[in-house]
């Protein structure tokens, strides 16, 4: 039976995009009226990267950044994302950043020569020589007088004890933990950290669940599944002994590459898993049956809709059956945008993973490989899912997970795609670029004659190299339970932490965006539990972009510290750019057929900007265009051929 339901029903709310460098779509918690088209200089029309200081390398932009800039409330989400742009840094201070205790001048000077006056926050006389603004722990910032006003700000500053053995300010309001266990619990073995049948009991008599230490492995050796659930610390750890795991693979033949199934199929057996099922063209009934089995891990790839997984003969909806698989991945677009999946998780289901918005095919191969690699390195399922997606720019703001923690199911997600409800009727004219109506583009982009800028020098800073890293911090996921603190504090703490890890700040590393990570327990109200802070690499004024993992530094920051971090910063080589390259309009038209096959949902392209493209496994820089969709997805195409950069 033909499967066209996704093509017709899987809708994306169009967002009116400013045709200027100060605009990005679908940023965290976008509020306020719909933006209006910018009347600024031509070189910025249709740009995608608002955080860049020189989107096209335009000297005019650097010299007069305020000409033609439309300052809208919230700068269309850039205030919440903490992006330094010509809008957020405008002399009028549209984000109200003056006097908030954080020094924004170093960030703003990267994008404009005339930012708002933030001297009150940057004045070294009252901010420990700038250490407050940088989020650094020093004998000054940790002093008893609390000069940075950090007490009670939602961030636990327990690290101050490392720089001041005594005399640090009282931060007990932010660092309060669970009450200590009774002194005589388990005959005193709680206090010495021992593992025995008492300390590991299901009732958790020592109060160790959520204390920042993963105890599941040690306790499972004593009590198996009868031990208390420590998934909050272990990131979805499954206590089943190695050799007793099984996995299932399903997909639908719908013009998508099922290479990610092959990645999982080849990777899991080495971890003690046995393949129980593979169905490359699964029906609704077959998927329902498979999800009801007592399998450890199920991976499905294909198309999706909100609350649905597309099958060969229709769709599997949340609620169609009870999911008993312990850990399930839906590598489909939009499926977890609906909150209905919580009620579908049976008693044996421990976690369910997926996306809240559109994703691209073939990128999932890299995600699947990184997830298997993280599991091989001893990470829990939730931790592995996060680490596999955090390094992908266009997935780091749309991953989602339902995880059973004790008696509750908790949703964690990076739902940055909050869209104004009134933009549907106001969206600018779009044109379908393929017969199936999968790929659309603003009509203005189809007349865009900009080319990749000539003479761009990408050599400075390209030689730096930092080893790739994917890590979960001590305490890990449980830190997200203690409050998020502020986004600005997270930005500064992420930079300070990464600087400590790297010894020196890499040349060309600039703030990319800050994405809130939300959590809700048993369908309760969602709250911000942390912030994913991402820095990108800029060479010769142009950002590096890729359709997979591209050069970046990132850290997930919670109220009590660093939860996880990822680093990709290899040495790069640039080659002379041929003259002339394609223009934006031509690249769009040439890319459309390939995009129509690779998209796991409809794409509406609303912006384009020059970028250095980086292909997986290559150290060469390619002249490219970064195409921005209304859901915030970036698609990188070669500016010479119009082909996707892979």
Image (cartoon, helix red, strand yellow):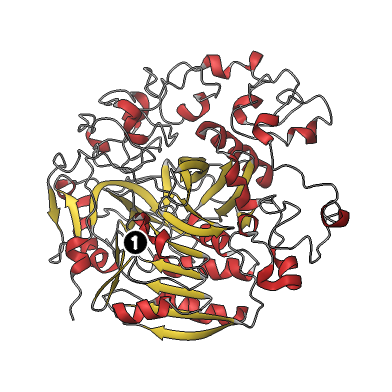
Q: Position of residue 322 (x, y in %)?
A: 41, 71
How many badges with numbers are in the image?
1
Q: Position of residue 20 (x, y in %)?
A: 27, 35
Q: Position of residue 623 (x, y in %)?
A: 36, 54
User: Quadrant where the N terminus lies?
Assistant: bottom left
Up/down of 533 relative to 572, above or below: above
Give the structural element (helix, strand or loop) at label 1: helix
Asked whether the viewer can see residue 229, the reply is yes
Up/down of 21 relative to 451, above or below: above
Q: Residue 252: name its quadrant.
A: bottom left
Residue shown at 44% from the left, 56% from the top? 400
Residue shown at 33% from the left, 47% from the top? 610
Residue topped by disc 1: 335
User: Dot 1, crowdedness within 10 Å: few (<14), some or many (≥20)?
Assistant: many
Give 310 or 136, whichever is nearer the viewer.
310
Q: Is residue 211 left or right of residue 532?
A: right
Q: Position of residue 395 (x, y in %)?
A: 42, 55
Up/down of 467 relative to 295, above or below: above
């Amino acid at each position: 039976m033909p499967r066209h339901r996704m093509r017709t029903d899987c809708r994306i709310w169009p967002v009116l995009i400013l045709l200027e460098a100060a605009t990005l779509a679908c940023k965290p918690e976008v509020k306020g009226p719909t933006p209006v088209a910018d009347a600024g200089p031509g070189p910025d029309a249709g740009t995608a990267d608002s955080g860049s200081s020189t989107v096209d390398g335009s000297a005019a932009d650097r010299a007069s950044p305020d000409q033609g800039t439309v300052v809208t409330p919230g700068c269309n989400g850039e205030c919440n994302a903490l992006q330094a742009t010509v809008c957020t840094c405008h002399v009028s201070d549209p984000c109200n950043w003056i006097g908030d205790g954080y020094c924004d001048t170093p960030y703003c000077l990267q994008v404009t020569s005339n930012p708002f006056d933030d001297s009150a926050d940057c004045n070294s006389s009252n901010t420990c020589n700038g250490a407050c603004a940088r989020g650094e722990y020093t004998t000054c910032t940790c002093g008893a007088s609390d000069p940075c006003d950090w007490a009670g700000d939602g961030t636990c500053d327990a690290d101050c004890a490392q720089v001041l053995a005594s005399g640090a300010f009282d931060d007990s309001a932010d660092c309060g933990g669970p009450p200590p266990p009774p002194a005589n619990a388990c005959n005193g073995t709680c206090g010495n950290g021992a593992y025995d049948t008492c300390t590991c009991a299901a009732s958790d008599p020592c109060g160790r669940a959520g204390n920042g230490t993963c105890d599941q492995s040690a306790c499972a050796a004593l009590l198996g599944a009868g031990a208390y659930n420590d998934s909050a610390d272990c990131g979805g750890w499954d206590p089943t002994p190695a050799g007793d795991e099984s996995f299932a693979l399903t997909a639908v033949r719908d013009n998508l590459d099922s290479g990610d199934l092959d990645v999982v199929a080849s990777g899991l057996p080495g971890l003690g898993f046995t393949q129980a099922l593979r169905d490359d063209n699964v029906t609704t009934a077959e998927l329902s049956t498979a999800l009801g089995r007592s399998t450890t891990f199920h991976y499905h790839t294909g198309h999706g809709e909100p609350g649905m997984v597309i099958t060969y003969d229709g769709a599997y909806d949340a609620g169609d059956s009870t999911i008993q698989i312990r850990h399930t991945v839906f590598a489909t677009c939009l499926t977890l945008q609906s909150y209905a999946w919580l009620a579908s998780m049976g008693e044996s289901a421990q976690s369910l993973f997926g996306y809240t918005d559109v994703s691209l095919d073939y990128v999932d191969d890299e995600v699947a490989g990184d997830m298997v690699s993280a599991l091989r390195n001893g990470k829990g399922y939730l931790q592995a899912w996060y680490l596999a997606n955090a390094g992908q720019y266009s997935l780091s703001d749309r991953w989602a997970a339902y995880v059973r923690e004790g008696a509750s199911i908790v949703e964690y997600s990076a739902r940055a795609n909050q869209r104004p409800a009134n933009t549907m009727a106001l969206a600018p004219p779009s044109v379908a670029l393929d017969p199936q109506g999968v790929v659309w583009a603003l009509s203005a982009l189809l007349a865009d004659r900009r080319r990749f800028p000539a003479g761009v020098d990408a050599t400075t800073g390209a030689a730096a190299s930092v080893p790739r890293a994917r890590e979960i911090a001590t305490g890990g996921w449980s830190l997200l339970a203690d409050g998020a603190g502020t986004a600005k504090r997270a930005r500064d703490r992420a930079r300070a932490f990464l600087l400590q890890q790297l010894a020196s700040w890499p040349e060309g590393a600039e703030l990319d965006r800050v994405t809130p990570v939300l959590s809700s327990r048993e369908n309760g109200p969602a709250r911000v539990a942390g912030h994913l802070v991402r820095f990108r690499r800029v060479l010769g004024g142009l950002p590096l972009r890729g359709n997979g993992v591209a050069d970046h530094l990132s850290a997930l920051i919670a109220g009590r510290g660093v939860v996880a971090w990822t680093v990709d910063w290899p040495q790069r080589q640039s080659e002379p750019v041929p003259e002339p390259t394609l223009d934006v309009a031509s690249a769009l038209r040439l890319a459309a057929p390939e995009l129509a096959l690779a998209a796991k949902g409809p794409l509406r392209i609303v912006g384009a900007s020059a970028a250095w493209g980086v292909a997986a496994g290559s150290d060469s820089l390619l002249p490219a265009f970064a195409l921005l969709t209304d859901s915030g997805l970036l698609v990188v195409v070669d500016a010479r051929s119009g082909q996707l950069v892979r």
